Amino acid sequence: MDSKEKEFLTRIESHKGILHKVSKMYMDNPDDQDDLFQEIICQLWKAYDSFKGESQFSTWMYRVAINTSIVFLKKEKRKIDKYEIASENIKEEDCDAYIKESQIEHFYKAVQKLDKIDKAIIFYQLEGFSHREIAENLGISEGNARVKLNRAKEKLKEIIKNQGYGF
């Protein structure tokens, strides 16, 4: 393995949590999430020579991951799987963990119903990006990023509320 490959793998390993989050935001089914994760890795490797170090690696990686996810969705046109977990299979001591996991899963399902730009904005917000950084990554003004973020949050609240979780 040459030094370029080692450097790439080291960088990916240190940021793979981000890639898992992107995959969960764009795909519902765990198998589809894995497929998207692998596709993002492939695209990152193909584009790695274009990374010039003018921005942080994680910023460049976000862009590639979001763009790959959008293309993947368009190309595959997959439908969201609906599945249920039977409550009788849950042990009492696992109840709190199940509730938390259920809330996270419910959140990701709600995010999946947003359009591609709103998904990206919510993702950047969750990752702690400033309005300026969101604007730069999406190629919009900072004011527009603020407005779009507020609208995306409102859409997300409405989706969650309509799916049975109230605020």
Image (cartoon, rainbow, N blue to C red):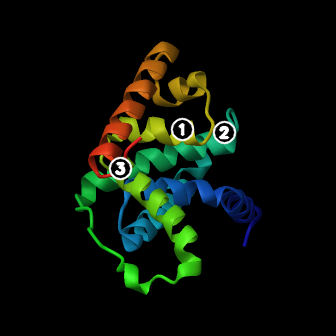
User: Which residue reaches farthest right?
Assistant: 3
* Badge 1 element: helix
* Badge 3 element: helix
Instruction: Tell me which amino acid carries mark 2.
Output: Lys
Residue 82 sits in quarter: bottom left
**Residue 41 at x, y percent in the picture:** 53, 61
- In this view, 25 is above or below 87: above
Residue 136 sits in quarter: top right
* Badge 2 element: loop
Q: How many marks can you see?
A: 3
- In this view, 109 is above or below 154: below
Q: Earlier in the sequence, mark 1 or mark 2?
A: 2
Viewer-side label of 1, 2: 1
- In this view, 142 is above or below 167: above
Read off the residue under disc 1.
124
Q: Is residue 46 left or right of residue 117?
A: right
Circle 1/circle 2 CB separation < 8 Å:
no
Read off the residue under disc 2.
52
Position of the C terminus, as image quadrant, is top left
Residue 150 or 117: which is nearer the viewer?
150
Q: CA distance from mark 1 to mark 2?
A: 22 Å
Residue 50 or 92: which is nearer the viewer?
92
Q: Earlier in the sequence, mark 3 or mark 1?
A: 3
Read off the residue under disc 3.
110
Q: Earlier in the sequence, mark 2 or mark 3?
A: 2
Instruction: Tell me which amino acid carries mark 1.
Output: Tyr
**Residue 121 in sight in this render:** yes
Disc 1 residue crowd, few under 14, some 14–19, many 20+, Cα 10 Å = many
Disc 3 residue crowd, few under 14, some 14–19, many 20+, Cα 10 Å = many
Position of the N terminus, as image quadrant, is bottom right
